[in-house]
Image (spheres, helix red, strand yellow):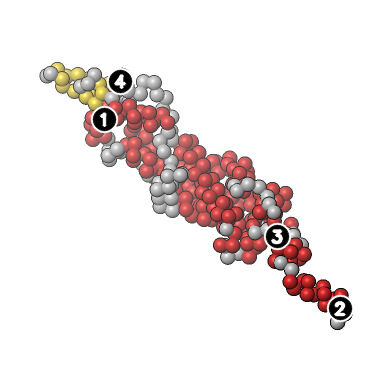
Amino acid sequence: MKFPLLVAILAFLFVSCDELDEILDLGLSDEEIVEGLKEALDTGLDSAVTSGSSVDGYLKNEAIKVLLPEEVTKLQSEIASGSVAGVISYQDLLDLYVATNANIDTDPFEELVVAMNRGAERAATKATPIFVDAITSMSFTDALGILQGGETAATDYFKTNTSSALITAFQPDIKTALGETAATDIYAGVVDFLSWEHTETVLFVPVTVKVNDYIGQDLSLPETLDEYATTKAVDGLFHLVGEEEKKIRKNPLEYASDIIQKVFGSDEATGN
């Protein structure tokens, strides 16, 4: 063996790992970038949808739990703190109303929150084919931009490309689910409570209380909760997708897929 060749081999054997990577690194091919990104997105989306559509996936996750609309929360607060001329509290009036309303069992506001979240959980599975379409139509330019982007670049891509379709797909299911979980009836009951009349005897004199004369006069309650609950359900799903994306970017080696490890551990992904 000629001496120069021996020197070259020895030098190759003793270079550092970083130097060896630099010598051998041929970069990622376009196909590898797209394949790795799509597989990572499939993995992350599947996990997010599974989490959101599970029982209590929304209800017990404070980050995405669907809460009452602002106007309804304000009404709830007024009922909890007010009274009719100090004679009968709004809460007592509500309790009397609930006792005569077959659609409400206990606390209409709490029941409403539970029902809306159950609706979101039922609708979440609708997201999968829409996300899959967005992944399938992704170009190399899209993939490279996502790979080199921030920690939620893929989630932002989905927001841009799927929000409208998700809302369109979710709303019928949310509406159906709200009906099945009784949220629609419960909310109708809350709205009807404002126009309810109750006769109370005060010092042996019957006094008729018209609820709307006392509370909710400056409130403009939504006609239905369909649109509100749908938007919140979609927002919650994007939050879950974003959290999964962060996990993949932070620890790609925790995933079994070789292509995910290769692509998300690459210079393109890490910015080195």
In the rendered view, tell whether residue 158 sits above or below residue 91. Answer: below
Residue under the point 58% across and 40% down: 164
Instruction: Kindly indicate whether the residue at mark 1 contacts the one at mark 2 (C-beta within 8 angstroms).
Output: no
Q: Residue furthest left?
A: 204
Estimate how packed mark 4 is, as few (under 14), some (14 to 19) or many (20 or more) residues with alpha carbons within 10 Å: some
Q: Which residue is mark 1?
A: 91
Q: Which residue is mark 3?
A: 32
The answer to whether any part of residue 217 appears in the image is yes
In the rendered view, tell whether residue 46 sits above or below residue 234. Answer: below
182 or 52: nearer the viewer: 52
The answer to whether any part of residue 25 appears in the image is no
Say which mark, if any, is on residue 214: 4
Which badge, 4 or 1, comes first in the chain's sequence? 1
Which badge, 3 or 1, comes first in the chain's sequence? 3
Q: Looking at the rendering, in which quadrant would you find the C terminus?
A: bottom right
Which badge, 2 or 4, comes first in the chain's sequence? 2
In the rendered view, tell whether residue 65 sits above or below residue 54. Answer: above
**Amino acid found under the numbered disc labelled 1:** Gln
**Amino acid found under the numbered disc labelled 3:** Glu
Instruction: Indicate the position of residue 92 as horizontal and vertical percent values.
Output: 23, 30
Say which mark, if any, is on residue 3: 2
Secondary structure beneath label 3: helix
Q: Quadrant of residue 2?
A: bottom right
For marks 3 and 1, give the CA distance. Answer: 62 Å
Instruction: Indicate the position of residue 97 as horizontal and vertical percent values.
Output: 26, 31
Front of the two marks 2 and 4 = 2
**Amino acid found under the numbered disc labelled 2:** Phe
